[in-house]
Structures are given as C-alpha cells and as structure tokens.
Image: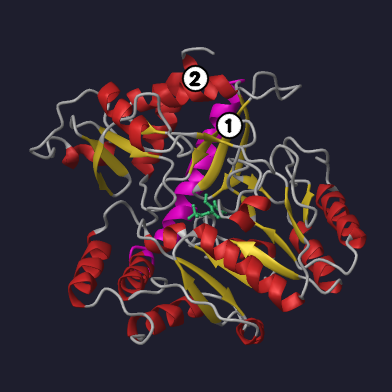
C-alpha cells in the first residue's frame, strides 16, 4: 500500500500493548456503553493509537492521512503544545477564580488578533458553550429573543444552540418544530440554492431583510458562520454579510460570527473568517482549534456589551480559562505564528483547489468544489442537472479511502460532501497523496 509521504517515520512505531480483540469486539463494547448519538465515522473503525502532525497511526502500524480534523489545527500531539500542557499541569492546573496570570496573557493574545472594538474575552470549554453564551449575551443586552440563522448551519448541541442548528442534529427542530423565536434564512449556496446568478448575494440578503421586517420588536441577533462548514464548506458570496449586518443592526440587533470551525487561518487568507467579507461582528465565538484538542472555547465582544451583560447577571465557568487551558491556548497561537501555518493553509489550499477542480472535470460524480484554503468540500452528485446527492457513494468512498490510508468523512445536508479540512500543517506531498487516492477511488467507477 502506498503510504502518505510524510508518514514514513511513523512506520513500526507501534506501542507494545497492541490490543488483541477484533474491531467487531471493540464495536460491541462501544455499543454497550457509548450512546448511539455519538457520531461514528466508519463501520469498521481503525484503532487509532497516536497522532503525529497530519497523520494518525493505528495499532497495526498503519498510518492514515487525516483530512477531516479541523480541531488539531497545528497537528496532532504537537510537542510544544504537549510541553506547555504538561508543564502547567505539574505547576497549577485549576483555580481560575483568583489566579489569573495565564488567563490574562491568553486573553491579551486573543484580543491582539482581533480588530477593534472587539476587546473583551469570556472563557468557556467548547464551541457549544461559546455559541450558547453568545446567545445569552445578545439576548440579554438587546432584551429580545428572536434570532436569525442560516438553514443548514450548525452551532452546537446545547439547548439554545440546538434550536439554531439544522445539519448534523436529527433533532425535533430539524423535523419542523423549531421554536417561534428562531428564524431560518436560506443558506446562500450558489451551487444548490434558489439563487445562483450574479445577484445571488443581494437576493439572499433580501430574504434576511424580509425576515427582519417581520419580527415584531426586531431581532436580537443574526448568527452565522462566515463560510459554512457543516453545510459542506459552502462559501458565503461576497456582499451578502455586509448587507445582512447592516439590516440587522438598523433594526437594533447584534451580529455574531461563529468562528468555531473557520477561525485561526483555516480559510487560507485572514485569521478570522469574517475578515474576508470586510465586516466586523459584535460578538465572535471560537473553540475547536483554539485548544488543538484540549477543551477550550471563548467569546469575544466589545467592552460596552460585556459590561451591560455582566451588570444583568453573573457568568462563571469553573474550568473555562483555567491555567492549563490558557497555557495550551497560548502555545497553539505561538506554533501557528512560528510555523507560518496560516500562510501554509493559503499555499496548500490554493494547490488543493486547482487539483480538485481538475479532478471535477474528469469525474462527473463531483458536482462542485466548495470553500477555500483548508476548508473545502467535494460535493458528490449523481446527476449534474438534478444535483441528486450521491450520499451512499460518499459513504462508500470514505470507507475505500480509509483502506488506502486516508481518513475522510462526508458532511452537508445530504452527507454527500467530502470534507477537506486537514490540520493546517499538511504538506504539498500529503495534499497530492489525498487527491491521487481520491482520483484512484473515483476512477474505479460509481
Ligand atoms: N459552531 C460550529 C460552527 C461548529 O462547527 C461546532 C462543532 N461542529 C460548534 C459550534 C460546536 O462546537 P463543540 O462541538 O465544541 O461543542
């Protein structure tokens, strides 16, 4: 089997205590104790024992190129992140109520990366918590509850974020019982949506304007990703967000940019996703990459909003912004900067776009290459006219890619969009390895 080129140093590096039970036995154990709602990627999952850069190694010594892990932004088990975590764990690992050193440094580093006036940080532990807190902030500050979000977006599993999420959650809201304070605007998807022409951004913005006009008392907020990850890496057309932000603000509402997946340079251009649209939100939410796997989430807003919120009640997270989270968070930012990973995402992302577009021209199953940077999606369709989603094909292709040494997974409303979201340290050789394996699998005929 061809090996992902950068993974050769992993070969033979297996741990001494390789489990002897079969994958089936492990799955039986899993199903006895792990809730079914947990997302499982593969019918026969590899037993991953260690991570290294953009690779994973299973207990049999097989190395996989990880094309889906947007949490491990600087690469799996980065030694500098590990060192920062171990050092801090050995010194002081909790006490955020009165020991602030690490938290202050971390907050300063975050604020330095954001445009004015976003200057005040709240620390939590996950993306769901971050968006949940953002909802609480905008609703408390505006004294309103109505929230506009995009159909096909995802913002978390908590009670409040679940209400504004559609993909992934096969929840009661997805089945049509969304609460009356949640308003779904159409996803501005230029491949599959209602408007696809040159005026699409304006038409989709019109849809938000008409929702805003219909909310008695006005909306509390508009919440969206600036490039929609779980919809399949769907790019929001230029010109859309400036119009939406303006109409929501004109009605007295606030805007939240959910950067949980897209932030930290993943789009191959700016550090934050909203920057590519030339807008500045009132509230930013971040998690995932912030901790490179360690549970870290945060919300940033401007001082006056933070103070108004704090004056109306307390907020406290027992472990948010803990000394270990802060040390890890700073180490991740250091590595991103020192290893030039934002620039790497731009370079490799552009290379991947070119190669994937060339693949699209040769394989009719590929309907569209979504996204940019290291945040792309390969949408599979059975028919280029009807755009019938190739969902079963996508599942089978992921299984086949796994056999060839690539971890892949499909997302989107129809689970037919292959994710292209590797750690930002991926090399050109590994990117080529992915495209070549995908080419090989697609060439087998579907
Ligand atoms: N917002 C977005 C855009 C996400 O993609 C996710 C996770 N997929 C979340 C929020 C929730 O984050 P978490 O899983 O850390 O709770």
Q: Nearer the viewer, residue 250 or 11?
A: 250
How many callouts does the rendering have?
Answer: 2
Residue 226 in the image: state x and y as whole percent: 64, 57
In magenta segment, residue 386? no
Q: Quadrant of the N terminus?
A: top left
- Residue 367 to residue 283: above or below: above
Camera-near label (1 vs 2) is 1
Residue 415 in the image: state x and y as whole percent: 58, 31
Q: Is mark 2 within 8 Å of ligand 1?
A: no
Q: Residue at x 75, y 39 (%)?
A: 176
Q: Is mark 1 within 8 Å of ligand 1?
A: no
Mark 1: secondary structure: loop
Q: Which residue is mark 1?
A: 415
Q: Which residue is mark 2?
A: 442
Q: Main secondary structure of the magenta part?
A: helix
Residue furthest to the front in view is 32
Q: Residue at x 80, y 40 (%)?
A: 196
Q: Give the residues drawn in magenta, as a range.
A: 336-364
Tell me the CA gap for discs 1 and 2. 17 Å
Residue 273 in the image: state x and y as whole percent: 59, 61
Residue 94 in the image: state x and y as whole percent: 30, 75
Q: Is residue 308 left or right of residue 296?
A: right
């Amino acid at each position: 089997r061809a090996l992902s080129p950068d993974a050769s140093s992993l070969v033979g590096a297996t741990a001494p205590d390789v489990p002897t039970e079969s994958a089936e036995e492990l799955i039986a154990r899993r199903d006895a104790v792990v809730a079914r709602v947990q997302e499982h990627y593969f019918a026969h999952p590899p037993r991953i024992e260690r991570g290294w850069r953009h690779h994973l190694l299973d207990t049999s010594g097989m190395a996989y190129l990880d094309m889906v892990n947007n949490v491990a932004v600087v690469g799996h088990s980065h030694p500098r992140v590990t060192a920062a975590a171990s050092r801090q764990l050995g010194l002081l690992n909790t006490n955020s109520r009165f020991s602030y050193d690490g938290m202050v440094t971390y907050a300063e580093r975050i604020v330095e990366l954001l445009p004015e006036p976003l200057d005040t940080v709240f620390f939590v532990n996950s993306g769901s918590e971050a968006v949940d807190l953002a909802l609480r902030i905008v609703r408390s500050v505006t004294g309103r509850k109505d929230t506009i979000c995009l159909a096909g977006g995802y913002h978390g599993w908590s009670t409040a974020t679940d209400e504004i999420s559609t993909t992934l959650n096969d929840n009661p809201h997805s089945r049509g019982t969304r609460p009356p304070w949640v308003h779904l605007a159409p996803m501005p998807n230029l491949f599959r949506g209602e408007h696809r022409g040159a005026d699409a951004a304006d038409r989709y913005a019109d849809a938000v304007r008409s929702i805003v006009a219909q909310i008695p008392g006005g909306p509390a907020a508009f919440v969206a990703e600036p490039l929609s990850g779980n919809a399949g890496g769907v790019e929001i057309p230029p010109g859309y967000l400036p119009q939406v932000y303006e109409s929501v603000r004109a009605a007295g509402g606030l805007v939240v940019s959910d950067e949980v997946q897209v932030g930290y340079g993943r789009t191959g251009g700016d550090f934050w996703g909203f920057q590519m649209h030339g807008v500045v939100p009132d509230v930013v939410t971040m998690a995932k990459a912030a901790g490179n796997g360690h549970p870290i989430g945060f919300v940033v807003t401007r001082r006056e909003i933070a103070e108004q919120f704090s004056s109306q009640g307390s907020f406290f997270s027992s472990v948010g912004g803990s000394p270990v989270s802060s040390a890890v968070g700073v180490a991740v930012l250091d590595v991103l900067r020192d290893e030039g990973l934002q620039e790497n995402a731009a370079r490799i992302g552009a290379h991947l776009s070119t190669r994937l577009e060339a693949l699209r021209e040769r394989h009719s199953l590929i309907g569209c290459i979504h996204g940019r940077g290291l945040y792309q999606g390969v949408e599979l369709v059975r028919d280029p006219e009807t755009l019938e989603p190739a969902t079963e094909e996508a599942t089978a292709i992921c299984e086949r890619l796994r056999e060839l040494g690539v971890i892949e997974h499909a997302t989107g409303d129809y689970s037919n969009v292959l994710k292209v979201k590797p750690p930002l340290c991926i090399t050109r050789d590994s990117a080529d390895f992915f495209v070549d394996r995908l080419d090989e699998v697609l060439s087998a005929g579907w």
